[in-house]
Image: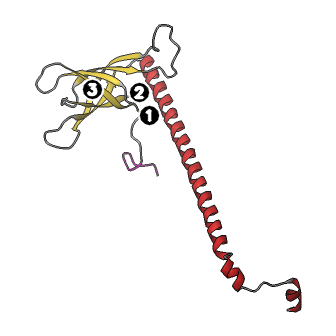
Amino acid sequence: MSPRKGGPGIERRRSIRADANLSMRVEGQPLNGDLTKIVTESQNISASGVYCTSPHYLAPLSKVALTIILPNRAPQKAVNGPSPRRLLKCDGIVVRCLPSDGKARPQGYQLACSFVGLDARHRDVIEEYVSWRNLESMGRALDAGSTRRATVRTARKTVRAASRTATRSTQRTPAKRAARPRATRAGRSAGR
């Protein structure tokens, strides 16, 4: 039996996404009709689209112009200043524009845009960035997990050592030693 589309735990997206806070600009026409340039930051990105926030409502299925600044994966030593960044310019379609806080008069909107007419070169650049970003995130998570595990192991060892010390000290108090008769070798062998 094949898995049901859209069911819980099933990914419907065609492209892998990566959480990324990238500087970007969205040019579109809100409901008032004036062309608006929105400077914002992405929340995540894939080869098929980008998700960000917007102070303006942009109607679903409206056309937008997107400019996204992708950092170089590995910083190169630049002779005159910081390493260059990739500027990605493309068209998009608004897929979703929802109030950020769910109120009737929101403070902003969650904006999802699908790339339109993205050439293969730009798609490859985004896919490469997404792969690198996800690998980088996995590496950080693994490092944090091993640090956490090491901390837990150290804490457990400390608790065990303290427990053993406390048990030994309560078992061998001078009063208990004096009250309990000691068996000698002769006494042990005589008792047999």
The amino acid marked with disc number 2 is Ala
Residue 41, position as x, y percentages in the image:
32, 27
Pointer 3 or 1: first along the chain? 1
Q: Which residue, given by chain and number where applicable, does mark 1 sit on? A: 16
The amino acid marked with disc number 1 is Ile
Residue 147, quarter of picture: top right
Q: Quadrant of the C terminus?
A: bottom right
Q: Nearer the viewer, residue 60 or 29?
A: 29
Pointer 2 or 1: first along the chain? 1
Pointer 3 or 2: first along the chain? 2
Task: Look at the magenta stretch and give its main secondary structure.
Answer: loop
Kindly check if marks 3 and 1 are in contact, taking CB atoms under 8 A apart as contact. Answer: no
Q: Taking 182 as reference, is 168 left or right?
A: left
Separation of residues labelled 3 and 2 (CA atoms)? 14 Å
Kindly check if marks 2 and 1 are in contact, taking CB atoms under 8 A apart as contact. Answer: yes
Q: Taking 23 as reference, is 98 left or right?
A: left
Label 3 CA crowd tier, 10 Å (few <14, some 14–19, many 20+)? many
Q: Give the secondary structure at mark 2.
A: loop
Q: Which mark is residue 93?
A: 3
Residue 178 higher or lower than 140, as above or below: below
The residue under the point 84% across, 84% down is 184
Q: Nearer the viewer, residue 39 or 131?
A: 39
Residue 186, quarter of picture: bottom right
Q: Nearer the viewer, residue 191 or 116?
A: 191
Residue 142 is one of the magenta-drawn residues: no
Label 1 CA crowd tier, 10 Å (few <14, some 14–19, many 20+)? some
The amino acid marked with disc number 3 is Ile
Residue 71, position as x, y percentages in the image:
43, 21
Q: Which residues are magenta?
A: 1-9
Q: Which mark is residue 47?
A: 2
Residue 22, position as x, y percentages in the image:
37, 26
Q: Give the secondary structure at mark 3.
A: strand
